[in-house]
Image: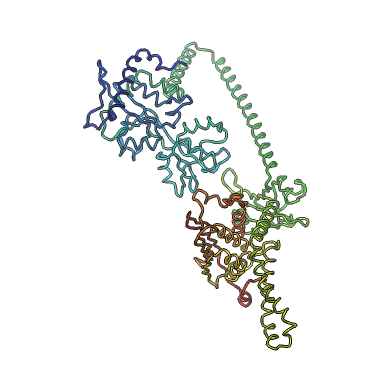
Amino acid sequence: MIKYHELEAGINLGRKLKNLVLIFLILTSMPPVVLLPADKALGILDTGDQKEILVRVAVDKNLPPFSYIDGSGQLNGYSIDLIKAIEQNSDLVIVTLPMEWDKAIKALKNSDVDAIFGMKYTSERDEIFDFSDSYFIISETIVIPTHQDDIKNLADLKERTTAVQKSHVAANLLKDVRRAQINVAFSQEEALKLLIMGRAEAFLGNPWTAQYYLKKFGLENKFKMVGGTIQPADYAIAVRQGNYQLLNKFNSALKTIKANGQYDRIYYRWFGERLSFVTARLMKIIKLLATFLVIVALLAMLWNRKLQIEVDKRTKELSQANLNLKQQQKLIAENDAFKEQVLNSVKNGIITMDLEGRITTVNPAAVNILKLEDISKISLLPATSINQLKKILEPFRKQLEAFEEVQQAEIDLSLNGEIKHLTCDISPLYDVQGNIMGTLLTLQDRTHEKKLQNKLITQEKMRALGQLIAGIAHELRNPLTSIKTFVELIPLKHHNPVFREEIARYLPKEIARLNNIIEDLLDYSRPQRAKKEVFNVHQWLESVLLLFHKTFRDKNVQVTKEIDETLYIYADPRQLKQVALNLILNALDAMGDCNQKHLTISAQIKDKSVVLLFKDTGKGIPRDQIDKIFEPFFTTKTNGVGLGLTVSYQLVKENQGEITVDSTPGSGTAVKLEFPAAQPSSKLLAQGGIDHA
């Protein structure tokens, strides 16, 4: 297709070449000529036969189809074609400068450019810049994944992460949305990519640009635009405030190209026919139709003929309506079949119940997970009449009666001698009017995942145990040496009453000490199911540190303990012991080559929570790695497998705790564990330790 401006290329070729040479000489030999405010002089190019004005115009280089760098490396777009048309119809010589949007705004503020071609008008911007007549009506739109239906307008972006371009008006729109979270990118394309990569739940920006990139990426069917036309406003040329001389030239050129038809040709090239063209064509058709009806009236057709024509017309309309109805029925049937196929294909169990608690839908996954009978046999039965469902729903009776949501509830269900670990969600079902029509129960079988997790925990536990074996052997050797010494002296001093008293006093203590070490070791290594109990934090930490006494001495590690002896928490002490062992081993590795080796372990109460802190003076963790340390198989050690902190994170979460890491490279690392504080029972206080009841 021949571009409109190519028709005038021959006429302007000589002028363009001469102007380009002059522009190059000016830009390379002296400071850039700029358009100054109204009280200043314009930059003038004297081409001999006429004087022309040099203007530097910035455009957003990442805003297709308005202005962008195309595949051949050329600056292209609707705004670019308008710039060329304005240049042809004015005494302006325009140097177009493609920039990042925020840099273009900064450049105009700093007088590095004379104008920005393509800026949306807002009252805030009007206080900084002056705007030309509008050459486009621009608006914003919301882009979300096709499957998402809970975002329909700006208000629905509350408490959601939305991707926007830096310095774009979309960011200001989100300021009025409470608790809206913004993920900022340098361009519309990068902001849209944040949505595509899942780092944002929605994109707010230019609908034409969004449509261009979705088509480019082949994702038109994966995302949709919602919210209608958001904040439509004039799209115009912005100049520095007070530069009315340049503003008048732009407005004059815009009026000229609108009058001579260039504007409409450019618009048609990029966006198709303008609404005014379509309206004019419709009006022409309406006039022709009116003329035709007048001619028909003048012909004075017989009334019965006119009536027959009308009957035939109505008959066709009814036939078409009937055909449309059949097509809609077919479409509904196909949609129902598709939904049924999706329901039968998902791996999660799905069960729906009506307002009376009767089963209305059960998918095959739910039948398989719960070992239910044939679907036809349980349909419309009360859910509580089925033993498996009764065990699941009984703990949530109050929520079911109130139609409240239950999220990520974990349930252990015994089925035919097998323990199934399930995660269930319960939520109300709504009809098209928004009225509650029943309850939705979704089930996820995590049995296999739990087994793998337990296996992973056991493997990590054995790895940590292997690292501690030298210290444990030393702790065992000390009481054994004392016992051996006493035994060897029995034949020589068994008649000595003082010796017998010493044996009676020291030997039981050493045996008890040996027994405690063995019990702690067996208790740690023995595979057990999670068992939460209230225990004393001080005694628990002392049992952990006992395994490191020799290691601390051998590696010259100074240990500082700041532990409140009155703290209790409700958790599994064996699982948390594994966490503590991992953290201490990591601290020892981090301080391996350090001159000052200092490990601080504290336990304090804070806001009804027990806060445990493990702080070392090791080499620390680089800033770019701090967010990855809990990821499986991520490690900075040459001989590590990257599972220690992953397992520790899972164990802390399973015990309703929180784990955070703060590290400064070269200064050390602090790992904080936080658990709800517990109150010891009278029985526990009497025992002075852990409540095993």
The residue positioned 69% from the left and 76% from the top of the image is 511
Q: How many marks?
A: 0
Q: Position of residue 580 (x, y in %)?
A: 59, 62
Q: Position of residue 18 (x, y in %)?
A: 31, 17
Instruction: Point out the residue furthest to the top here.
Output: 299
Q: Position of residue 657 (x, y in %)?
A: 57, 60
Above or below, comparing residue 94 to residue 511 in the picture:
above
Say if residue 425 shows up in the picture: yes
Say if residue 609 shows up in the picture: no
Q: Nearer the viewer, residue 237 or 505?
A: 505
Above or below, comparing residue 484 to residue 570 in the picture:
below
Question: In the drawing, does residue 668 fall left or right of residue 147?
Answer: left
The residue positioned 73% from the left and 88% from the top of the image is 495
Q: Nearer the viewer, residue 150 or 27?
A: 27
Q: Quadrant of the C terminus?
A: bottom right
Q: Nearer the viewer, residue 50 or 547?
A: 547
Above or below, comparing residue 623 to residue 585 in the picture:
above
Q: Quadrant of residue 420?
A: bottom right
Question: In the drawing, does residue 442 fall left or right of residue 292?
Answer: right
Q: Nearer the viewer, residue 436 or 467?
A: 467
Instruction: Point out the residue furthest to the front here.
Output: 492
Q: Quadrant of residue 323?
A: top right
Above or below, comparing residue 351 to residue 543 in the picture:
above
Scheme by which the image is coloured: rainbow
The residue positioned 77% from the left and 57% from the top of the image is 417
Question: In the drawing, does residue 75 fall left or right of residue 369?
Answer: left
Q: Position of residue 404 (x, y in %)?
A: 59, 54
